[in-house]
Image (spheres, grey):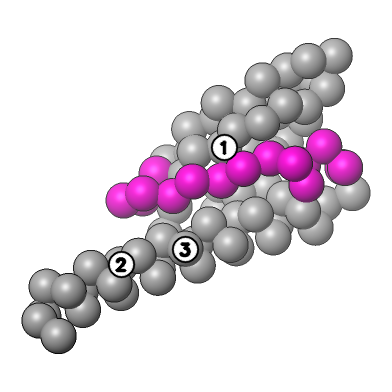
Amino acid sequence: MSGQTEIRQSRIAEHAEIQRIAHTRLAGTANIDFRHLSCNFDDGVLTLRGRVGSYYHKQLAQENVRHVDGVVQVVNEIEVQP
């Protein structure tokens, strides 16, 4: 296996782990809406998608994942549907 392939596989595994940690943080909250949100991580940017019932919950979801190691920026694409 080439060095480039190993680096790429390591990076993919790291991104998957960061996504898993972020999703676990969301799923572990008392708010049932958060269990249905998706997380996508790429090069320091964590993107949140899905629907919640209020703007407050949208912001709360963002705060729950903001301090995950490796996350430099959170892009919050969560839709609010009361």
Question: In this image, 24 relative to 67: left or right?
Answer: right
The residue carrying mark 2 is 11
Locate the C terminus by quadrant. Answer: top right
**Residue range corresponding to the magenta coloring:** 31-45
Please rate how many residues cluster around mark 2, counting C-alpha atoms within 10 Å: few if below 14, some from 14 to 19, many from 20: some
Q: Quadrant of residue 51?
A: top right
Local packing at callout 3 (Cα closer than 10 Å; few below 14, some 14-19, many 20+) is some
Q: Label 1 belongs to which residue?
A: 48
Quadrant (top left/top right/bottom left/bottom right) for the N terminus: bottom left
Residue 44 can be seen in this image: yes
Pointer 1 local density, CA inside 10 Å: few below 14, some 14–19, many at least 20 = many
Q: Position of residue 78 (x, y in %)?
A: 63, 26
**Residue 11 position within the rendered picture, expressed as x and y whole percent measured from the top left:** 30, 67
Secondary element type, mark 2? helix
Q: Residue at x 62, y 43 (%)?
A: 38
Looking at the rendered structure, the kind of residue marked 1 is Leu
Q: Looking at numbered disc 2 in the image, what kind of residue is underneath it?
A: Arg
Element class at badge 1: strand
Residue topped by disc 3 = 16
Q: Position of residue 40 (x, y in %)?
A: 49, 46
Residue 57's x, y, as percent? 77, 30
80 versus 22 height, above or below? above
Q: Which quarter of the figure has residue 31?
A: top right
Mark 1 vs mark 3, foreground winner is: 3
- For numbered disc 3, what is the local secondary structure? helix
In this rendering, the answer to whether 82 lies above or below 78 is: above
